[in-house]
């Protein structure tokens, strides 16, 4: 029977292969033909499939897992970040300024300077900065620095001047201009207030965006990613993805979510070519899916924009922001149930999550549909009574393990000791029977999915703190953590028949690792390195 299958294009032997396929959980060999998995099993059996032109690779005991899928990421955002000043991990306002100065030393007067990654929670004061020192350092250049979570901007006086922002500028709906005691803008803009600044920044050219996308794809491959779920892109960016995929130069399987297209049936939504086309799956030999719509319920916890049912413990005058009206979410849920799109809504606070669950519940009562796979992106702080509703409604909580390890130093101060028990509550959700597709939200967190795996099983920082893990009762097992970066994201994107496990007939997407993440001590997981990344049996990255 094996001989009848014909010879393979590629055979890998002498490996430790974790297939994430219950029919054959582990194997030592894998055969590939025509970009698909032909066979998974023993070395002796794989040799039968080896012909004169078969490429044979001896792994010398290295570990293989299915191609890793990041279930929530921002590809163009990563590409832009790679070309801007990186502020992640800066320990003070002064360090932010010095990093910007070092990066922008050759900037021409008037040129816009952009960066990303500051987080006031890592600074001694833990307060939002005010613009004066940044404005003194850059009197002639507009500077726009995005907070690590993407939900706040910090800008200097020149940027506010060019955006025509004054003390008289009103807060937009779903946004906040943080102000000085005088009422003048401090330089920090939260959630929908970001638009006031962003509309003044010169748009990137198509060539700039194409270059950024290619850089981001290469960076993703370097960390073992073969697929991502791209959480909100516009028609122009998706057009570049199509162009690259058509040309065969797009080394990624991208499940794209359309950025909020406006009200359903509005001229704006009807003009969107991807709404007009309807749901699209596995385009260009399985490199592009365009069948989901990304909406926002609220902001982020770090910038106190996440919508809470009761005020912030550390800011009792504030309960967060609703970025969209609940009616907007419900209207899209109904429209999507009719048209076959999936709806994936960003919700971080317990009020934001409840609003989305209520909206989905209401839409599904009007238009009942099995297997809709609607999603809540982040599902970060949940009221205990809302946790079972995900399973009841068939809603997928798409979560990011490294958000927990990044936030654990200050999250409890935001929500207090009771609400924190429903935060980053992976085990509580898994117990109800749902799956949790895992991601990084890059460039919010680092691209490296092995940090995701480590956080999921330890609830510790990369330096293995705190001892025993933060609220350790919410940990995942290693098997769950592996599923959460492979087959569960595939399921969350209606892709489980073609990717997510090393099963004959599926695309031959896999990653070779230098150590066995299913067996090594917890403390050694983060030190694991990607040896090579393969998509459709083609090597797209090899470590030097």
Image (cartoon, rainbow, N blue to C red):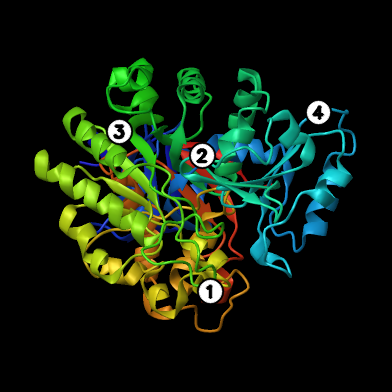
Is 250 on the left or on the right of 29, as rendered? right
Say which of 511 and 106 sits in front.
106
Tag 4–tag 1 contact (CB < 8 Å): no
Where is residue 514? Give x, y as percent. 57, 60
Q: What distance separates the C-alpha of mark 1 from that of mark 2?
A: 27 Å
Residue 330 falls in image quadrant: top left
Tag 1–tag 3 contact (CB < 8 Å): no
Q: Residues within 10 Å of mark 3 (few under 14, many from 20)?
A: some
Residue corresponding to mark 1: 413
Tag 2–tag 4 contact (CB < 8 Å): no
Q: Which residue is painted at 67% across and 63% down in the image?
A: 127
Q: Which residue is painted at 37% across and 15% down in the image?
A: 271
Give the mark, 3 or 2, whose residue is nearer the N terminus.
Answer: 3
Give the mark, 4 or 3, whose residue is nearer the N terminus.
Answer: 3
Is 501 on the left or on the right of 446, as rendered? left
Do we see residue 499 in this rendering?
no
1 vs 3, front mark: 1
Q: Secondary structure at mark 1?
A: helix
Where is residue 26? Give x, y as percent. 34, 61
2 vs 4, front mark: 2
Q: Which residue is painted at 65% across and 58% down in the image?
A: 119
Q: Secondary structure at mark 2?
A: loop
Give the mark, 2 or 4, whose residue is nearer the N terminus.
Answer: 4
Give the mark, 4 or 1, whose residue is nearer the N terminus.
Answer: 4
Residue 254 falls in image quadrant: top left
Task: Identify the mark at residue 172; answer none if there is no mark.
Answer: 2
Q: Residues within 10 Å of mark 1 (few under 14, many from 20)?
A: some
């Amino acid at each position: 029977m094996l001989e009848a299958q014909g010879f393979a294009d590629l055979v890998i032997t002498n490996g430790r292969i974790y297939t994430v396929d219950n029919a054959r959980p582990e194997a030592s060999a894998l055969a590939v033909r025509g970009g698909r998995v032909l066979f998974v099993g023993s070395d002796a059996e794989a040799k039968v499939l080896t012909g004169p032109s078969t490429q044979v690779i001896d792994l010398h005991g290295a570990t293989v897992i299915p191609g890793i899928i990041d279930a929530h990421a921002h590809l163009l955002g990563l590409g832009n970040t790679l070309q801007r000043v990186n502020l992640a991990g800066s320990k003070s306002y002064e360090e932010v300024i010095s990093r910007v100065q070092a990066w922008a030393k050759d900037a021409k007067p008037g040129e816009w300077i952009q960066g990303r990654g500051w987080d006031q929670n890592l600074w001694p004061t833990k307060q939002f900065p005010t613009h004066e020192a940044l404005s003194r350092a850059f009197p002639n250049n507009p500077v726009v620095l995005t907070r690590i979570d993407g939900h706040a901007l910090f800008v200097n006086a020149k940027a506010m001047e060019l955006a025509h922002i004054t003390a008289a500028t009103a807060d937009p709906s779903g946004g906040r201009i943080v102000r000085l005691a005088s009422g003048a803008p401090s330089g920090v803009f939260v959630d929908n207030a970001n638009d006031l600044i962003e509309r003044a920044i010169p748009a990137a050219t198509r060539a700039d965006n194409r270059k950024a996308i290619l850089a981001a794809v290469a960076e993703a491959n370097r960390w073992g990613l073969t697929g991502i779920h791209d959480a909100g892109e516009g028609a122009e960016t998706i057009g570049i993805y199509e162009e690259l995929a058509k040309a065969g130069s797009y080394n990624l399987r991208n499940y794209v979510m359309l950025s909020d297209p406006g009200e359903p049936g509005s001229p704006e939504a009807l003009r969107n070519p991807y709404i007009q086309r309807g749901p699209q799956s596995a385009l260009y030999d399985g490199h592009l899916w365009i069948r989901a719509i990304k909406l926002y319920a609220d902001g982020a916890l770090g910038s106190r924009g996440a919508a809470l049912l009761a005020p912030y413990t550390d800011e009792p005058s504030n309960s967060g922001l609703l970025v969209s009206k609940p009616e907007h979410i419900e209207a899209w849920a109904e429209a999507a149930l009719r048209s076959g799109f999936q709806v994936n809504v960003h919700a971080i606070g317990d009020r934001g999550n409840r609003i989305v669950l209520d909206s989905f519940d209401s839409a599904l009562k009007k238009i009942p549909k099995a297997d809709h796979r609607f999603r809540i992106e982040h599902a970060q702080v949940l009221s205990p009574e809302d946790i079972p509703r995900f399973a009841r409604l068939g809603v997928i909580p798409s979560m990011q393990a490294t958000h927990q390890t990044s936030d654990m130093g200050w999250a409890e101060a935001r929500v207090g000791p009771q609400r924190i028990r429903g935060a980053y509550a992976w085990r509580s959700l898994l117990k109800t029977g749902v799956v949790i597709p895992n991601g990084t939200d890059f460039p919010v967190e680092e691209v490296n999915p092995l940090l995701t795996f480590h956080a999921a099983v330890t609830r510790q920082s990369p330096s293995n703190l705190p001892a025993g893990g933060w609220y350790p009762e919410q940990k995942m097992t290693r098997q769950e953590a592996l599923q959460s970066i492979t087959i569960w994201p595939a399921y969350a994107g209606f892709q489980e028949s073609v990717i997510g496990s090393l099963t004959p007939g599926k695309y031959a997407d896999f990653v070779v690792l230098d150590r066995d993440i299913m067996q090594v001590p917890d403390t050694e997981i983060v030190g694991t390195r990607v040896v090579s990344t393969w998509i459709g049996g083609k090597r797209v990255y090899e470590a030097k």
